[in-house]
Amino acid sequence: MSKRFRKGDKVRWNSHGGHAEGEVLKEITSDTEAGGRTVRASKEQPQYLVRSDKSGGEAVHKPEALEKL
């Protein structure tokens, strides 16, 4: 089973300039539009909408790309 995160969790992920840190906004468990792209997700394979603390930008990541702080 992959890692699970909750809304409000502080996380880190790889970004273009190194690492970024931010907050989980939402667990995505069905196909949807988020972070400027089509997200393929399910209850078994969720993805997470996160907001960068530095830029305020939003992105969607798979759980294996996130590290809980």
Image (cartoon, rainbow, N blue to C red):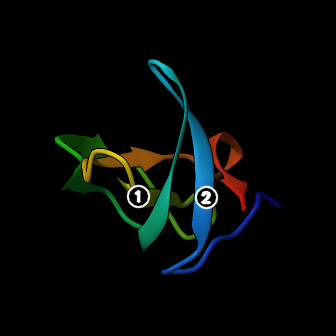
Q: What kind of element bears circle 1?
A: strand
Cβ atoms under marks 2 and 1 closer than 8 Å: yes
Apparent side of residue 68 relative to residue 30 in the rendered image (left or right): right
Q: Position of residue 66 (x, y in %)?
A: 64, 48
The residue under the point 47% across, 68% down is: 24
Secondary structure of residue under mark 2: strand
Q: Quadrant of residue 32?
A: bottom left
Q: Nearer the viewer, residue 2 or 18?
A: 18
Label 1 CA crowd tier, 10 Å (few <14, some 14–19, many 20+): many
Does the image show residue 54? yes
Q: Which mark is residue 69?
A: none
Name the residue at 49% across, 45% down: 61
Question: Looking at the image, can residue 28 be seen?
Answer: no
Sequence-wise, the earlier of marks 2 and 1 is 2
| Residue drawn 48% across the image and 57% down it | 22
Q: Is residue 15 above or below residue 58?
A: above
Amino acid type shown at disc 2:
Val
Residue beneath disc 2:
11
Q: Amino acid at mark 1?
A: Val
Q: Nearer the viewer, residue 65 or 9?
A: 9
User: At x 63% / y 71%, what residue is drawn?
Assistant: 5
From the viewer's perspective, is 48 left or right of 12? left
View extreme (bottom): residue: 7
- Distance from the alpha carbon under mark 2 to that under mark 1: 8 Å
Residue 47 position, x and y percent, is 49, 56
User: Which residue is the site of mark 1?
Assistant: 50
Position of the N terminus, as image quadrant, is bottom right
Residue 7, x across and y down, in percent:
49, 80
